[in-house]
Image: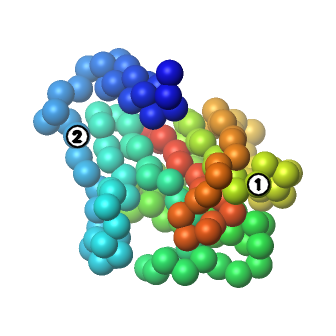
Amino acid sequence: MSRTYKISIVIFLLILANGVSAVDIEFKNPESFKKLGLPFSEAVRVGDLLFLSGQLGNQPGGLGLVEGGVEAETRQTMENIKAVLERNELGLDRVVKCTLFLADIAEWPKVNAVYKTYFGDNPPARSALAASGLALDARVEIECIAAY
């Protein structure tokens, strides 16, 4: 079973578990995001869940990655996640699941060292995997699901 198919099944089950209909789906795209012209939504609210698209270590409002290696990219990625959550009236304490995509799994310890500073005693569930290539030649991408 492909990864995409598995993710589709999980999203479908989450939607069913929340008892939502098509009316309860809200695409969250502020003007600053729309200006980037990307072919996806910044976030999508489905009932009491907010699905964030994968975030990279790009400078806010642009597509250029921060300099400084994987640690700097991870820090900026987490700041970008915080910003999306704040635009949707949530904080990192409401994140229930993250998936980390790494350009090189050998960088997992460096990514993890930065990542864990953003969560308290109750970090979200998480998966991490290596990808054969990330957008913009990023070293790390993180997607999250948060609950209202």
* Closest to the observer, 126 or 141: 141
Nearer the camera: disc 1 or disc 2: 1
Left-right relation of 66 to 28: right
| Front in this rendered view, residue 126 or 85 | 126
- Give the residue at x 64% y 33%: 125
Residue 18 position, x and y percent, is 32, 23
Which label was assigned to residue 104? 1
Q: Residues within 10 Å of mark 2 (few under 14, many from 20)?
A: some
Who's the residue at 45% across and 60% down the image? Answer: 84
Label 1 crowding class (10 Å Cα cut-off): few <14, some 14-19, many 20+?
Answer: some
Label 2 residue SS: strand
Residue 138: x %, y % from top left: 63, 66
Amino acid residing under circle 1: Asp
Residue 63, given in percent of the width and then of the height, sits at 49, 77
Which of the two discs, 1 and 2, labels the residue nearer the N terminus?
Answer: 2
Which residue appears at 66% of the width and 36% of the height?
127
The answer to whether 95 is drawn above or below residue 32 in the figure is above
Q: Quadrant of the C terminus?
A: top left
Q: Is residue 43 above or below residue 70?
A: above
The amino acid marked with disc number 2 is Ile
